[in-house]
Structures are given as C-alpha cells and as structure tokens.
Amino acid sequence: MGMNMGSGGGGGRRGRRRAPVMAEINVTPMVDVMLVLLIIFMVAAPMLTVGVPLDLPQTRAKSLDQEKQQPLTVSVNAKGQIFINDAEITIDDLEPKLKAMTEARGGFDERILVRGDKSVLYGAVMKVLGRLSLAGFKKVALVTEDEQGT
C-alpha cells in the first residue's frame, strides 16, 4: 500500500501507455452510399431510353457493337412521322439535316440507326432507307428488340 512517487515531478506520465491508433477503415457508410446509388440508378435507368417510343419488331439477330458516341437515330412511328433522335422532321428535310449533323460530328462514315414501329407500313420505312441511300450513307442499321418466348 505504498505510493510510488516518480522523481522529477513528471506526475507519473512515464508509466502510462497511449491507446493504439485505430488503422482500420470503417466501410459501413461507404456500403450504405453505394447501395443507395445502386437503387437510384436501377430506378432511373429505364427512364433514360433514347428516342421516340416505338413498338419495335422482334428478331433473333445479335446486337451490333456500340460506338463511343451516341449514334444518329432515325425513327418512324406508327403514324408514319419521321424523327431524327427526338426531333420530328419531314421526309424532305431528312437528307439535308442528316448531312449537316454528320458533317458536324465527323463525316459520312458514321452509322445511322433506323427504328421503325412494327405496325408502320413497310413502304414508309423503305422511303426513309431510300433517302439515306441517296444521301450517301453506307452504314445503316435497322433496330429491333430481342425475340421473346422462342
């Protein structure tokens, strides 16, 4: 029951040890943030579909390789209206507007995607394809959906 007084008036600090520094990273808040972001992107992704709402035909063909920039899309809806991306145009404006857009984006070697509603007349889509051919576009692809139930 004796008392140990250290010499030098240090007040006994020499004998105490500091608590070790915690070197672990707490990942729980990071996981929480990532899960919230995952849910947000899962909800928002279906709303980010590009273009005019169409009921596309279905096929078993495999998909094309995606390019780095967003391709130009020409759509023909069920009423026969023609759109470049989301902007409605007439058939006579199709060629000059596409030429201007492709020149601004880098030239005629760009792929043009043609989307046609499955209920639109075959002639309406062929009219668009004919104008694209006359305008000098060589990389033209038809967009379809994956075939379901087969």
Image: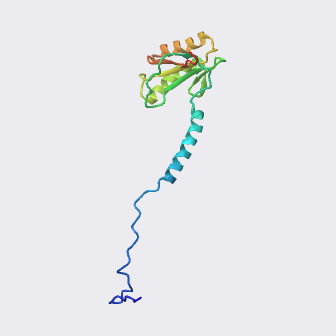
Vertical placement of 3 versus 137: above or below?
Answer: below
* Viewer-nearest residue: 55 or 36: 36
**Residue at the far right in the pictured view:** 79
Residue 91 percent across, percent down from the top left? 59, 17
Percent of width and height locating residue 42: 57, 38
What is the count of numbered marks? 0
Identity of the residue drawn at 46% across and 26% down: 102
Q: Nearer the viewer, residue 129 or 28?
A: 28
Closer to us: 54 or 13: 13
Q: In front: 39, or 45?
A: 39
Instruction: State the image coordinates of residue 139 (x, y, percent, origin top left).
Output: 44, 18
Q: Residue furthest front?
A: 1
Q: Is residue 17 above or below residue 59?
A: below
Q: Identify the residue at horizontal 60%, vertical 13% (top origin).
A: 124
Q: Which residue occupies the extreme left position in the image?
A: 7
- On the rendered image, what quadrant is the N terminus found in? bottom left
What's the residue at 48%, 21% (across, down)? 112
Q: Quadrant of residue 121?
A: top right
